[in-house]
Image (cartoon, grey):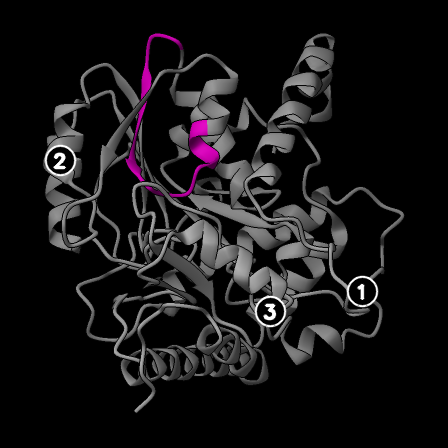
Amino acid sequence: MITRRSFFKVAAGAGAAAAISSSLTDRIFALEPRRWNSTQPSGPILLNSNENAYGPFPSVLAISNPFQDANRYPFHSVDALAHKLAVAKSVRDDQVLLGCGSTEIIKLAVNAFTSPQRKLVMAAPTFEAAEMHARAVGTPVAHVPLAPDYSHDLEAMLAQAHNAGLVYLCNPNNPTGSLTARKQLESFITRLPSDTYVLMDEAYHDFVPPGADYKSFIDAPIANDRLIVARTFSKIYGIAGLRLGYAVAAPDAITKMQTQSQSDSVNAFALRCATASLDDPAAHRLAVQRNAADRDEFMRQTLRRNLTAIPSTANFVMLDARLPVKQVIAHFEQHNLLVGRPFPPYLSHLRVSLGTPPEMVAFWQAWDALPQTNTKVN
């Protein structure tokens, strides 16, 4: 992390930066459907944000004193968790950078490697945070539609890579849950201009089933100093509300991102919960197995109704509703369920985050009450 002294050297520009940040936050959260406009006291069932419906690991909930040292600045704890991650991922400490969720990692990469003269290249549709941070600082954005199989169209992205400071790749991709093959990604990275960086967002890495044409670029690295890999504690670990993510990259890339960082964006509570999560591999295995079972059950229900869905490797599924998706979203809201927002150009596709079994029963009951779906339960 950058030092407090170096942070305060740039504090004079904090007012303008805060104004941009506030506006950007409003834009990001405006994408999500409102949550608490519900007649039910407990609020709606939330299947709209790819959250882990089961919550943190039991070992995290059992922490005896999660607020220990809350009166102290978290710098030592940041270093300790970064070291723990470095050991686990077989990298050096200076190759790990923590952030306030992986969204901060995305922001740091955009700020470090793009500019009004150095564009951002990304898929359409994909997770939008990179674009929003880019536009906030005047960076042009080149959108490349996904290929017909919902993978990243890497040849088309390569054609857009001239004068690109950063290419953003979400794999598995959000909102489609689809994969881009590892060998194709490796070839793509080596063919990019020598001064173009790649941000590989592996937020959904833990959900990818065995045997898929996938290998993490952290677990199976390549020799490329321009590749940054982002991970998060929001998904498999179920602590999205605590906001903690990290990047693994070459030391020089980490240093460039650190210069864009504030000194204390990660809090002590999140650090303690993340450490406990990493120390519980049995709970991690259970969470992976549970998500796979929930995803398989969702696909069985789609088949029973003669529906089609994009094959998912994540904790959500994109389902072809065969109706205008805005109409479908409104129907579910009337049944006290919130589902994913529209993702152009897939205007009949509905992104559904996997919930608990009772929540998914409620989803399918509402689905079966949807007019004119032409579905049949076998």
Residue 86 % position (x, y) = 46, 53
Residue occupied by mark 3: 277
Nearest the eye: 30 or 136 = 30
The residue that appears at 39% across and 30% down in the rendered structure is 253
Residue 166 % position (x, y) = 32, 26
Outermost residue, right direction? 71
Nearest the eye: 372 or 356 = 372
Residue occupied by mark 1: 66
The three-letter code of the residue at mark 2 reads Thr
Q: In the drawing, does residue 101 fall left or right of residue 72?
A: left
The three-letter code of the residue at mark 3 reads Ser
Q: Residues within 10 Å of mark 3 (few under 14, many from 20)?
A: many
**Distance CA(mark 1)–CA(mark 3):** 13 Å
The disc at residue 339 is none
Residue occupied by mark 2: 190
Query: Bounds of the magenta span?
Result: 116-131
Q: In the drawing, does residue 144 fall left or right of residue 40?
A: left
The three-letter code of the residue at mark 1 reads Pro
Q: Residues within 10 Å of mark 1 (few under 14, many from 20)?
A: some
Nearest the eye: 140 or 266 = 140
